Amino acid sequence: MTAALIKLLYLLAAVMFILGLKRLSSPATARSGNTMASVGMLIAIVVTLVFQEIVGWREILIGMIVGSVVGGVFARTVKMTGMPQMVALLNGFGGGASALVASAEYYRYLEAGQGVPLNFGIAIQLSVVIGTLTFTGSLVAFGKLQELVTGKAVTYPLQKILNALLLIGTLGLAVWLVIDPSNPVAFAGVILGAALLGVTSVIPIGGADMPVVISLLNSYSGLAAAMTGFVINNEGLIIGGALVGAAGLILTNIMCRAMNRSLANVLFGAFGATVQEIGGGPEGAPGDQTVRSLTHEDAATMLAYARQVVFTPGYGLAVAQAQHEVRELADMLQERGVQVKYAIHPVAGRMPGHMNVLLAEADVPYDQLYDMEQINPEFPQTDVSVVIGANDVVNPVARHDKSSPLYGMPILDVDKAAHCIVMKRSMRPGFAGVDNELFYQEKTSMLFGDAKDSFKKLIEEVRQL
């Protein structure tokens, strides 16, 4: 009866995971979906603690208290600009936890003098390899996002060959341990090889591709958790890990399509190895190209008397923390009869869904957020498109310049609006290191300065009209 009850409760938790994940597909139901999935996880945890053999209640309670305190502090103190870094760390911690549990099981078998059953041996090695790789790879991703490590793609001679040899060597040791698990030195070699592989596989990926990397590492952490579920024979962990792994892979594929690049190109293409540096203001335009700047008064007049305005946020919005000011200006424009919409590119920002989360924090109505496919047909009928710190995702060279690394990438058609206002601190290129053709077009005007300060000035100017 107990075994049947455990399986039934795990099944209930799995159903809540799936329904919660389904509800996350819409901003309107995302909060309830998150709550539903959380309740499912609570059920799985309680079932495991009550019905399964655990290390001891004291250790469990200490772990829960420490983890809750650390998580609570992070949740309250990490700014939205630091959220991608936090997600990278959480991915790493998930992978690391799976590797630690699998390692503990390996040493438990070793100390008991038992042979490791084949199915458990395979699961242990997969969990250790994937989990350790996820941990160190996520640390490198965190370092790149936090600018502790260069955001450029770091390459070196024979890099792909050395990485391939490292992967083959690590997997070879893992297979050996599945056949003959009584060699702790070889097990340490697997851990070391996987740790190095995590570093060497993420270092060659540039900052422009970090959203894809974060999504992929999230998938890895789920796969590692699923393998650990097989190690400890826990159905809830298997199902939860499989869902995370599948969702991460699907999201990774969606983001690769949004950039018109394959996953192999993201992982091995060294995109962003060089970054083009341009001057700090209008005088930084290359060659004989010029940019047009406008005053806050002119920009406010243009916006206040428009019929439709489309805001296009990028990472610059997160840096300036200007989402609340954007919402305030949008409300003022709507009171004047202006139709306001927001254009969201799938890879805008530094993590999947970054812009959606940022705007949701400012209570921007869900029905004003439009995906790229929805909003692009609207730009020809738009009076003013306002680009806020976005760069690569609005660069027209992606359409026609076959020599550009951005060529073929679907972009937001902000340049097809009657007027385009670009809000940036400087003329520096985006993560891809490519100069933006949009800045020099006749219908484009640059509004230089901190986005938050600029929006405050725009709000004051619109209020006086």
Image (tube, helix red, strand yellow):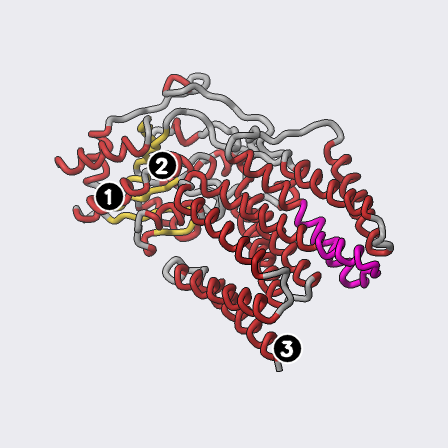
Between marks 1 and 3, how big is the CA–CA gap? 56 Å
Q: Which residue is mark 1?
A: 328
Q: Amino acid at mark 3?
A: Ala
Q: Residue furthest front?
A: 58
Decide: is 201 above or below 352.
Answer: above
CB-based contact (under 8 Å), mark 1 and mark 3: no
Residue 376 visible, this angle: no
Q: Which residue is mark 2?
A: 388
Q: Which residue is mark 3?
A: 3
Between marks 3 and 2, how big is the CA–CA gap? 56 Å
Pointer 3 or 2: first along the chain: 3
What is the x, y in percent for residue 358?
38, 45
Left or right position of 106 against 369 = right
Foreground mark, 2 or 1? 1
Q: Amino acid at mark 1?
A: Glu
Left or right position of 105 against 367 = right
> Dividing the image into 4 quarters, which one contains the N terminus?
bottom right
Q: Which residues are magenta?
A: 103-132
Q: Amino acid at mark 2?
A: Ile
Residue drawn at (48%, 64%) of the image: 37
Between marks 2 and 1, how big is the CA–CA gap? 15 Å
Badge 2 local density, few (<14 within 10 Å), some, or many (20+)? Answer: many
Residue drawn at (42%, 43%) of the image: 412
Residue 193 visible, this angle: yes
